[in-house]
Amino acid sequence: MVSEHALLALIHGRRSIRRYLDRPVPRETLGRMLEAARWAPSAHNRQPWRFAVLEDATRRASLAAAMGERFRADLLADGLSMEAVDRQVRRSYERIAHAPVVIVFFVSLVDMDQYPDPARQESERAMAVQSVALAAQNLLLQAHAEGLGACWMCAPLFCPDVVRAELDLPDDWIAQGLLTIGFPAETRQKDREPLETRVVWY
């Protein structure tokens, strides 16, 4: 049993790590992370999460390049300079392609309830998305407990069709984000806003 203080220390110690050592992550470690994700709470216990684990460097580079092309088109449409576009696309590519492992996480709505009215259907979709986010948080915490660094990237949200096509996944797999993962090559410190600025008590 993990003590309440040990759990809070683990949560406090986790940071978004973007630079990694050139060292492979053992498959059994990734398995424990995915097992932690599997035990996240989910709406109706439907477990709408799906995961694609990219250990292969060529596959990571291919996904990063495909996502980068969409990112480039969006930034150019926004009116950014070519220099700024190149800089942002290159940074995104390097973060994904150079990470030892990438886990892309998806939501699938196939097992969720169906409603005749759009408002309730949108709420059902939101519950599924929230469930996937909880699973991703478990991944992040288990990664930290294993001595790994990880960083949440929301980029797949902007090009779910690109991600699905590049990884040749079923149509119901809707990309929500990805985690870059590896043994940390940096340390980061960041604080949070005071609790009283975010909480009301009744």
Image (spheres, helix red, strand yellow):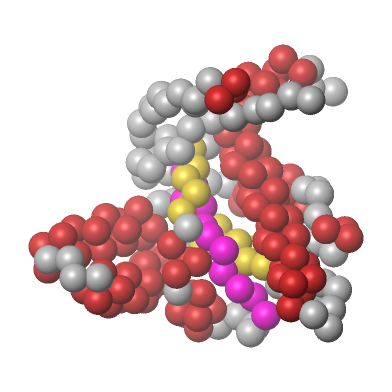
Q: Is residue 105 left or right of residue 90?
A: right
Look at 65% across and 38% down and name the residue there: 142
Look at 47% across and 45% down and name the residue there: 151
Q: Compared with residue 147, is residue 182 higher up or lower down, i.e. above or below?
A: below
Q: Residue furthest front?
A: 202
Which region is colored magenta? 172-182
Q: Compared with residue 60, is residue 34 higher up or lower down, i.e. above or below?
A: above
Provide residue 126's location: percent of width, then percent of height.
70, 63
Q: Compared with residue 183, is residue 9 higher up or lower down, i.e. above or below?
A: above
Look at 63% across and 84% down and name the residue there: 171
- Front residue of 65 and 70: 70
Quarter of the picture holding the C terminus: top right
Provide residue 24's location: percent of width, then percent of height.
47, 47
Q: Compared with residue 51, is residue 16 higher up or lower down, i.e. above or below?
A: above
Q: Is residue 103 left or right of residue 79?
A: right
Asked whether the viewer can see residue 35, the reply is no
